[in-house]
Structure formats: structure tokens, C-alpha cells
């Protein structure tokens, strides 16, 4: 099937590939970026959109104090388990999209109270990260974590619960912000807005799924992972009218009606675009995303390829405009310093930074962009940087101020830094030598390198990608 895509930059520089890895993954070491440079930009995008099926994780298995992780039993190990995948996976876009979909279908273990269910949902999101959205919607609608999170397990024909029906329309799939009409260049319209009656009727159609608490507690591993079951006696089998369509609808019909709603494709396209690009999509980009998505039968890859091809994705390579979310900051910091998961520090550091995987603040997910930065989290970014750099710097020997900054840039896989920042860092390096000279010892060499690298990672430039 023929899809339409923007033209990629004809003469990409290494900075284009770094941007690609930063936003479609979790950055990368010099060798990791070089791998994509050798492929060329078209093949690099194709590889990111085509997940590896074997040997996906590269590097040492994660540990905590020398012991294997126990995500079902120990605090923070669920976070470490996923963070490890972000660091080691060759499927970088899959992991980044798994995070984006976790934010879109925001489900928190604070409400679910079952890590086994959360890990299962995570695998579900990963399996559809660049796959079919309709299939994902069907599966997540009856996912045990979601059924507990939005009360689907308590819904029945006598008292249908509207929570999931409301959120699947308002937040997950259709949206209700009147500004979307202008932001999507009229592809999303207020005239097609769903109604409260649509929510109520969808809630009736969604009844019938139940949760076996005994199996969840004492069943087989498979039963504990998914103790839900269909009970036709609890399902409202009567006629319902949703978006003007009448029938004896059930949960599958709700999913079908939602993805075929005229506002769904533009809403999802706009939502996904916003995870990758700070400025609103152009009219042509919106048309390409929506048309590719609908033509493909709700496949995410043809939609995402528009984003990864679009000139706006590669705009301002010398002045990035997106704030690194805490999880991206930590995962990319580990990748750029060539480190792996060996302690539980990252779990509580992410907690301090305000973004812990499996624990979004509410059903709306995390507020993106500058919302991640405040007086508390700014301190946490610096604190985390100290952990990322701990015991990673050896005595570089005598260096000129310019060489010291160049060496720090190289050690961190050449992060973006403005010319003004580089000048100020060189001034710092010179002043340090003046204050501690005339001859710097090994401790001085390491301390100066540590400060320069910390400024590159957690200074104003380092928080953008």
C-alpha cells in the first residue's frame, strides 16, 4: 500500500543522527550513534521502525548489589527492570514508544496494587509499540491492570461503571479539547465531539469482564498474571447507541467504534507528534499521519515514519527545544557513560526527579516539557548526575582549558552545548587552573573534568534534547 512521507534531509550530519537517537530512543554512545550514521538516515529510520526479534538486549544483566533483580518482590526493582531495557535494548524506538504509550494509557501501580499486572501491561505496550493500535486498544481494554485501575472489574449490567468509557474517549483515543480543531488544521472537529450519552452507552457495552481475586492471590503463575474472565451474565446484552450507531454492542464493538470515530486518527496523530516535536504539526504532516494511519488499518509505524521524516523533527539542531523527561535523562545518561544497572539508586533518584515508571501521577499521565523542571526536580537532576558520573572519570593528565572541555564532550558522546556554554566552560577550566595552579595534580584533573561533565549533563543545555 502506498503511503506518503516527507522527504528526509538530503545531506544529514552526525547531529541529525544524534537528534534521531535522542527523541526516538534514549541517546547513544559514540559507537551506537556511529552504527546509525553508517546505515544512512533512511535505513536508520527503517531499522528503528523494524524491531529486532533476537538478541534484543546487549550488555550485562541488571543487578542490585550483585544480586539479580526481583521486580515482583523488592521495592524499585520494577523500575530497574524497565530502565535496564531502555539502556540495553537495540529496539530504542520500541522502548521510547512503550514509554509514550504508558503515558497515554496512564496506569499507576499506586491504584492497581499488583506489580505482576503492571509488568504484563508493559509487555503488552511493548508488543504494540510500533504495531497496530486497534489491537492494542482491544487488549488493554481487558488488561487486568486497566480493569483494576479504571474499575472495569467492578462494572456490571446492573451498575455499569463509566470510568474507562470516559477516559478511553477523553484521554486515550478521542480528546475533548476544543483547541484541537485549530491544532489539527480542522481534521479533528468539535462538531464530532462525543457526548455523555456515548460514555454511558459505552459503559454498558464494556460490562461482562470480572476479576478472580482468589486466582490472583493463589493461582498458577499464568492465573496470577491474568485472573480476569468473561461472564456473559454480567454483560448488558441490550441495544446501545454509540456515536449514532445502534446494536447489541460489547467491548470489541466499543474499540472498533472508537478507532473508526472521525476524531480518533487526528487526535492520536497529534498526541504522538507531541512526544517527538515541540511545535504543532503542519497541515500537510497532519494529513499524511492521518491518511497513513487509516489506510494501514491503524498501524502506528506509517504514522511514526511521517514524524521521523519530517523537517520539524530535525529543526534547530543547534538549539534543541524539548526538555528531557527524567526517565530519558537517566536512561540516556547511563547509555552515554556506558554504564549498566548495578544498584537500586536509580529508583529513588527518579522518584526525586518526579517520574517513576509504573507510577504516573494520575490517569492523565505526566505533564511534559518544562513541567518536569522546578526547584525540587532541578536539584534532583544534579544529584542524579553525580551518581551517573561516580567513578567514571580517570585522571586525564595535563590539559589546556579547551582540551579539557573537548575531552568532556567526547566522553559524553558529544552532547549538544551552545557556543556560549563551551566558552563559559573553557573559562571555568582556565580559572580552575589559575586558582589551583601553577601545577594541577591528579585530584585536580579529575575534579575539573567532573565539574565540566556535570555542567554538560545537568546545566541548562544538558536538560534539552
Image: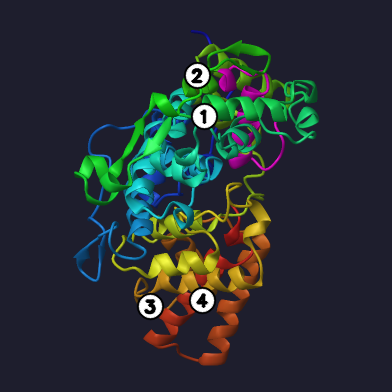
Against 457, is 169 above or below? above
Q: Quadrant of residue 46?
A: top left
Question: Going 60% across and 36% down the picture, which residue do you hit?
Answer: 162
Q: Main secondary structure of the magenta part?
A: helix
Q: Earlier in the sequence, mark 3 or mark 1?
A: 1
Percent of width and height locating residue 263: 68, 23
Q: Earlier in the sequence, mark 1 or mark 2?
A: 1
Front: mark 2 or 3: 2
Which mark's residue is nearer the viewer, 3 or 1?
1
Rendering quarter of residue 77: bottom left
Q: Are marks 4 and 1 in contact (CB under 8 Å)?
A: no
423 magenta-colored:
no
Q: Sequence-wise, which precedes: disc 2 or disc 3?
A: 2
Upstream in sequence: badge 4 or badge 3: 3
Q: CA distance from mark 3 to mark 1?
A: 74 Å
Label 2: element kind: loop
Q: Nearer the viewer, residue 234 or 256?
A: 234
Mark 4 vs mark 3: in front: 4
Residue plotted at (61% across, 55% down): 464
Task: Give me the disc on residue 157.
Answer: 1
Q: Nearer the viewer, residue 232 or 292?
A: 232
Determine which residue is flagged by label 2.
Answer: 237
Amino acid at each position: 500500500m502506498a503511503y506518503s512521507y516527507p522527504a528526509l534531509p538530503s545531506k544529514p550530519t552526525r547531529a541529525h543522527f544524534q537528534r534521531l537517537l535522542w527523541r526516538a530512543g534514549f541517546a547513544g554512545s559514540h559507537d551506537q550513534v556511529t552504527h546509525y550514521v553508517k546505515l544512512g538516515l533512511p535505513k536508520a529510520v527503517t531499522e528503528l521502525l523494524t524491531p529486532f526479534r533476537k538478541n534484543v538486549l546487549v550488555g550485562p544483566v541488571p543487578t542490585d548489589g550483585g544480586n539479580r533483580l526481583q521486580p515482583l518482590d523488592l521495592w524499585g526493582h520494577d523500575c530497574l527492570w524497565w530502565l535496564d531495557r531502555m539502556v540495553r535494548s537495540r529496539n530504542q524506538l520500541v522502548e521510547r514508544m512503550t514509554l509514550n504509550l504508558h503515558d497515554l494509557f496512564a496506569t499507576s501501580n499506586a491504584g492497581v496494587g499488583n506489580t505482576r499486572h503492571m509488568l504484563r501491561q508493559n509487555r503488552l505496550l511493548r508488543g504494540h509499540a510500533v504495531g497496530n493500535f486497534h489491537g492494542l486498544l482491544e487488549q488493554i481494554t481487558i488488561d487486568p491492570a486497566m480493569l483494576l485501575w479504571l474499575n472495569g472489574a467492578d462494572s456490571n449490567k446492573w451498575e455499569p461503571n463509566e470510568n474507562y468509557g470516559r477516559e478511553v474517549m477523553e484521554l486515550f483515543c478521542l480528546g475533548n479539547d476544543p483547541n484541537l480543531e485549530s491544532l489539527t488544521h480542522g481534521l479533528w472537529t468539535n462538531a464530532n465531539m462525543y457526548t455523555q450519552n456515548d460514555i454511558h452507552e459505552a459503559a454498558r457495552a464494556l460490562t461482562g469482564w470480572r476479576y478472580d481475586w482468589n486466582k490472583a492471590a493463589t493461582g498458577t503463575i499464568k492465573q496470577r498474571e491474568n485472573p480476569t474472565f468473561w461472564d456473559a451474565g454480567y454483560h448488558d446484552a441490550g441495544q446501545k447507541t454509540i456515536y449514532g450507531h445502534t446494536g447489541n454492542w460489547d467491548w470489541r464493538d466499543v474499540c472498533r467504534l472508537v478507532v473508526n470515530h472521525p476524531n480518533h486518527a487526528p487526535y492520536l496523530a497529534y498526541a504522538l507528534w507531541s512526544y517527538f516535536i515541540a511545535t504543532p504539526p503542519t497541515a500537510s504532516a497532519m494529513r499524511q499521519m492521518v491518511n497513513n494511519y487509516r489506510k494501514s488499518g491503524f498501524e502506528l509505524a506509517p504514522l511514526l515514519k511521517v514524524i521521523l521524516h519530517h523537517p520539524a523533527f530535525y529543526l534547530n539542531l543547534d538549539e534543541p527545544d524539548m526538555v528531557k523527561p527524567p526517565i530519558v535523562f537517566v536512561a540516556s545518561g547511563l547509555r552515554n557513560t556506558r554504564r549498566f544497572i548495578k544498584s537500586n539508586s536509580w529508583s529513588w533518584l527518579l522518584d526525586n526527579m518526579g517520574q517513576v515508571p509504573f507510577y504516573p501521577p494520575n490517569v492523565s499521565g505526566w505533564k511534559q516539557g518544562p513541567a518536569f523542571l522546578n526547584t525540587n526536580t532541578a536539584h534532583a537532576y544534579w544529584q542524579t548526575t553525580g551518581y551517573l558520573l561516580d567513578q567514571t572519570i580517570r585522571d586525564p593528565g595535563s590539559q589546556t582549558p579547551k582540551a579539557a572541555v573537548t575531552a568532556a564532550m567526547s566522553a559524553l558522546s558529544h552532547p549538544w552545548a551552545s557556543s556560549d556554554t563551551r566558552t563559559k566552560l573553557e573559562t571555568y577550566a582556565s580559572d580552575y587552573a589559575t586558582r589551583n595552579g601553577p601545577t594541577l595534580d591528579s585530584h585536580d584533573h579529575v575534579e575539573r573534568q567532573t565539574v565540566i561533565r556535570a555542567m554538560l549533563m545537568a546545566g541548562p543545555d544538558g536538560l534539552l534534547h
